[in-house]
Amino acid sequence: MPTRTARTAWNGTLTDGSGQVELSSSKIGTYEVSFPKRAADDANGATSPEELIAAAHSACYAMQFSALIGEAGGTPHALDVKADVTLGPDPAGGFHLSGIKLTVRGEVEGIDADTFAKLATDAKAGCPISKALTGVEITLDAALEQ
């Protein structure tokens, strides 16, 4: 399996500095990062480690879930997956990821709502990004839409 690479060039201190995150493997872009924007409610044109984790988690989860639906005999016509990753103060000092909420809505043929819910939970447990983030509470809100 391949290895994917990103790199960050950072200048300055935590509070006064800023950087650029480059998605090196895909070469699809370079994005601004700074701690003040990371800690603010409005990202104001900059990304953050939390947003990048949210992107990775939502994509990974969608792939895992679609695979499980197919294995169960269903046909996923559409899965809308959102990951909300929250940064919070760490009681031990500094910061930590205080939670991740996965929300999925799906249009799926060939399975019922109970099977959809079970597979959604199984996908959360089996997604490689979920496995990597076992130290963070991950909640799930899944609903089959007809």
Image: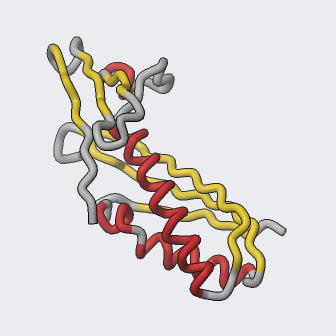
Would residue 87 be seen by someone viewing this image from the given angle? no
User: Where does the image place residue 5, in percent across and percent down from the top left?
Assistant: 25, 45
Q: How is the image coloured?
A: secondary structure
Residue 134 location, x and y as percent?
A: 31, 65
Query: Residue at point 84% right, 69% down?
Result: 146
In the image, 78 versus 123, the foreground residue is 78
Q: Quadrant of residue 120?
A: bottom right
Q: Quadrant of the N terminus?
A: bottom left
Q: Quarter-wise, where is residue 127 in the image?
A: bottom left
| Relative horizontal placement of residue 3, taking residue 87 as reference (left or right) | left
Q: Residue, x 27% and y 50% (percent of image)? A: 4
Q: Relative to 124, is 95 above or below?
A: above
The answer to whether residue 66 is left or right of residue 107 is left
Q: Nearer the viewer, residue 121 or 97?
A: 121
User: In the rendered image of this protein, does residue 120 appear above or below residue 101?
Assistant: below
Residue 81 percent across, percent down from the top left: 59, 56
Residue 119 visible (yes or no): yes
* 145 lies left or right of 53: right
User: Residue at position x 35%, y 35% from top?
Assistant: 27
Considering every residue shown, the one lying at the far right of the view is: 146
Q: Determine whether 73 is above or below 39 in the image.
A: below
Image mark count: 0
Q: Residue furthest bottom?
A: 72
Q: Is residue 41 left or right of residue 25?
A: right
Q: Residue at x 39, y 41 (%)?
A: 52
Task: Give 71 or 32, whichever is nearer the viewer.
Answer: 71
Return the x and y of residue 77 as percentages of the image width and height: 73, 66
Q: Is residue 138 above or below residue 26?
A: below
